[in-house]
Image (cartoon, grey):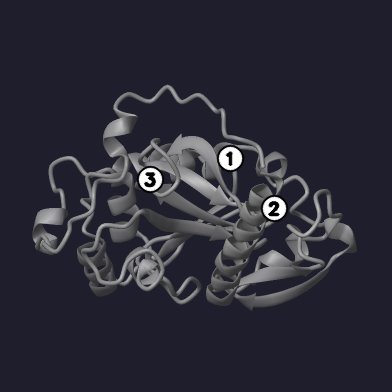
Amino acid sequence: MRIITKTLALIGLGLLSATGYAQNQMQPVEELINKTDPAWPLVKKWIDSAKNKVEVLELDSAKAKEALYNAQVSTYSTLGSIIYNTGGIMVDNGWIRILGSGSTKLNRSVPEWNKGKTIKEYGDKPDYLLIADDAAGGFFAINYGAFGADLKNVYYLAPNSLNWEPLGAGYSEFILFCFDSDLSKFYKGLRWSSWDQFIANLDGNKSYSFRPYLWAKEGTDIEKCTRKLVTTEELFKFNISKQKELQAAASDKKSEKQ
């Protein structure tokens, strides 16, 4: 996958990146709702001027408060504002699913989706935080130390490599990338010719699995692969399991050569 290189001339963008997570101490939701300088008005401007098709999913205010509390992020941040003000965001007819507080079409909130994957309990400090995924079985996450020293940058678990690849962007930049960039370039090799006919009504909790596996051989032609819809939950667990197997196998080969 290509690394995002888009330059952003936005004052104070870094201040809108995701805030840190509490460890064993939960702030009341009232303290997380920033009434003086929330990020949402700026995010709304991004949505209104987006070059790609952006759908903001319906919001349940009670679920939004619960998700914000469980996530322990302030609405001063871009991440907190999206959790608190959206049920999630679908980009490019739903090809990319940005997690919010959950909705009928995307029944997963940021904290709920991460529980059991990157955290055991709400309030735990994650090594990385899952914040979006796509129809091709790719997953986006904020790095909090699991992937390298570039903390708060977004990584992509690419379905054609099963590697966490750095995008060279923070969360706010990632959102702008989803809204404004040429996604066909980023997803070159991961979209089949008729992909758009299958996406519009796709359940946001399902993703496509391909045979042969896209990661099994470099340069696999997706046009020649068969596709099967599976739950995104199932696909994530499978990909992480296979990733560990591939890393172990690579480590064994390296040891044998030495």
> Is the residue under label 1 in contact with that under label 2 (CB below 8 Å)?
no
Would you name the residue on which mark 1 appears?
A: 51
Of all residues shown, which one is farthest toward the right?
224
Q: Quadrant of residue 180?
A: top right
Q: Please provide percent x and percent y for residue 193.
A: 84, 56
Q: Please provide percent x and percent y for residue 140.
A: 50, 53
Within 10 Å of disc 2 (Cα), the crowding (few <14, some 14-19, many 20+) is few
Q: What's the CA distance linking mark 2 and mark 1?
A: 46 Å
Q: Name the residue nearer the viewer: 55 or 120.
A: 120
Q: What's the CA distance linking mark 3 and mark 2?
A: 50 Å
Q: Please provide percent x and percent y for residue 85.
A: 31, 58
Please state which amino acid type lies under the numbered disc 2. Answer: Lys
Q: Name the residue nearer the viewer: 25 or 93.
A: 25
Q: Above or below — where is 156 with respect to 124? A: above
Please state which amino acid type lies under the numbered disc 3. Answer: Lys
Would you name the residue on which mark 3 appears?
A: 44
Within 10 Å of disc 1 (Cα), the crowding (few <14, some 14-19, many 20+) is some
Disc 2 or 1, which lies upstream in sequence?
Answer: 1
Q: Is residue 100 left or right of residue 174?
A: left
Would you name the residue on which mark 2 appears?
A: 253
